[in-house]
Amino acid sequence: MQAIEAIKLTRRFGSILAVNKVSLSVAEGEIFGFLGANGAGKSTTIRMLTGLLEPSEGDAIVGGYSIVKSPNKVKEHIGYMSQKFSLYEDLTIEENIKFFGGVYGLKTSELNARKESILKLVDIKYPQNIVTKILPVGIKQRLALGISLLHRPKIVFLDEPTSGTDPLSRRNFWEIIQSIANEGISTFVTTHYLEEAEYCNNIALIDKGKIIAIGNPQKLKKTIFSERPIFEIDVASIENVLLLLNQEKELGEFAIFGTKLHLYSQQKNANESTIVDYLLQKYRIQVQRIRKIQPTLEDVFIHYIESNNNGSN
Ligand code: ATP
């Protein structure tokens, strides 16, 4: 059985179609990344999957329960860390754990046993009697993550858990997500940091409420690499480059990356010498060096979002 199986999940707010027939599945122990720009529909999807918001249409089975028929069962069986993770800042680490343990209905003996292993899992070495508000943001996030796991859920939902922290804290946080996955817990995580998607087993890209790409990040990159090769080009002078950027449609799209040009080719079989000849003849642009490059996830997303905007996806 899959940990999460969403089938054509749809949500409208009046005339706004916030989430449009989202289908996805997440396996046990999988880290699933949900990516998209602000307003794309990430939070609305997460709120439906966690039983907090009723879908307009469609359904999802989360931890074996339907979000439509048994939203309360879903809530009991999952962990959830919202964007504004809700620690009580005036309480100590230990008091926060006790408070939320009580909310989850854990007995004192259970909670005491659980507390140490959770603090170890999220790598918090601070004394437990420290007031939460003086902790660095990255540590607070880890504590909030730990608390969302107190009642041993098999699935945890994290809504932009790393926003507002430095790269090192983000990397630490992802190492912890990895250890959670190693314990067989499934993680559904939203982020807008593209580099974080690399840590996920699978990702979905949502744009205007619709999933426009889904799969393993490396496979998505490979597909783009073979379907729409990217070339890095050094030119002898920047003369006519502006013209090229504004006008060129036949070869594909050009963009400036630092001192180099990138060509997102339209043609699967585009080759270097044809591009070099074409640029010289049409724009009088002399190419010094050209090579095919590996796409980044950013390239993948740009490709799918543009295809979605052009209505071809
Ligand atoms: P963010 O990263 O900014 O949280 P998001 O991808 O999570 O963005 P959502 O918050 O899910 O996006 O919003 C999707 C769309 O639905 C947006 O157009 C938003 O304005 C709209 N929306 C969300 N909640 C409501 C609501 N309660 N009432 C009306 N419109 C809403």
Image: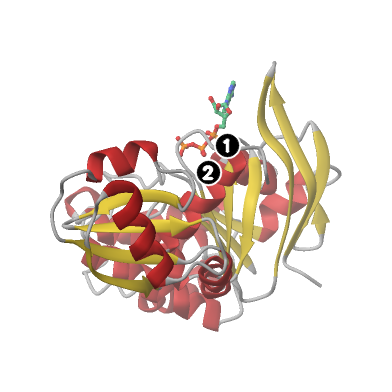
Q: Which of the 4 quarters of the picture holds residue 86?
A: top left
Give the quarter the ligand 1 occupies.
top right
Q: Compare residues 224 and 211 and report the one nearer the observer.
A: 224
Q: Compare residues 274 and 226 and report the one nearer the observer.
A: 274
Q: Residue at x 28, y 38 (%)?
A: 243
Question: Would you call the spot at circle 2 few (<14 residues within 10 Å), some (14-19), or many (20 or more)?
Answer: few
Amino acid tagged 1: Asn
Are the residues flagged by discs 1 and 2 in contact, CB closer than 8 Å?
Answer: yes
Q: Is residue 113 visible?
A: no
Q: Residue at x 38, y 73 (%)?
A: 292
Q: Compare residues 167 and 113 and report the one nearer the observer.
A: 167
Residue 208 x %, y %? 59, 35
Indicate whether 306 appears above or below 276: above
Q: Which mark is residue 188?
A: none
Residue 271 x %, y %? 46, 71
Q: Residue at x 32, y 49 (%)?
A: 255
Q: Which mark is residue 306?
A: 2
